[in-house]
Image (spheres, helix red, strand yellow):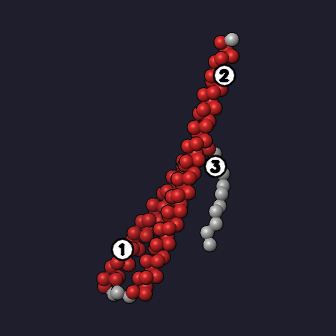
Amino acid sequence: MRVNVSYSVELEKVPTAVANVITQSLEDLKTIEFQLENTAKKLKNDPDISKSLTKIDSLRRDMAKIDVALMESTKILAGYQQVVAEQYLIQEDDGEVAEEKSEE
């Protein structure tokens, strides 16, 4: 069973946290690639269909987990981008208000 676990990080650390998820996904993909290559070699030499079916299904599920991690990373970065843009607009508005007061 998969569950969502949430934790907080400082806003400026969001890209690094997402980069860590992507790096882990890449490592997982490398492992999957290695295991998939071994499965293909075994099928050529000793076609034990039952073991191959089990392994392929397991690898497919592992790839789905990576897909979920990347989808979540996309959502996190989109939210981060929105917050940063909103902060920029607030700072810009505050700057204009400060300039208007100093002109009076």
Q: Which residue lies furthest to the top in this view?
A: 104
Q: Find disc 2 in the rendering and name its residue.
A: 97
Expressed as whole percent of the image width and height from the top left, the position of residue 48 reads 38, 88
Q: Residue at the location (65% across, 17% down)? A: 100
Q: Residue furthest left?
A: 44
From where the camera sits, is residue 63 visible? Answer: yes
Residue 89 sits in quarter: top right
Q: SS of the residue at dot 2?
A: helix
Q: What is the distance, in whole Å, between disc 2 and disc 1 at their CAs?
A: 62 Å
Q: Residue at the location (62% across, 22% down)? A: 96
Q: Find disc 3 in the rendering and name its residue.
A: 9
Q: Residue at the location (35% across, 82% down)? A: 42
Q: Find disc 1 in the rendering and name its residue.
A: 37
Crowding near pointer 2: few (<14 within 10 Å), some, many (20+)? few
Task: Decide which of tag 2 and tag 3 comes sooner along the chain.
Answer: 3
Task: Report the quarter where the C terminus lies.
Answer: top right
Q: Residue at the location (65% across, 26% down)? A: 94
Q: SS of the residue at dot 3?
A: loop
Q: What is the distance, in whole Å, between disc 2 and disc 3 at their CAs?
A: 31 Å
From where the camera sits, is residue 17 visible? Answer: no
Q: What is the distance, in whole Å, between disc 3 and disc 1 at their CAs?
A: 38 Å
In the rendered image of this protein, does residue 15 appear above or below residue 46? Answer: above
- What residue type is disc 3 on? Val
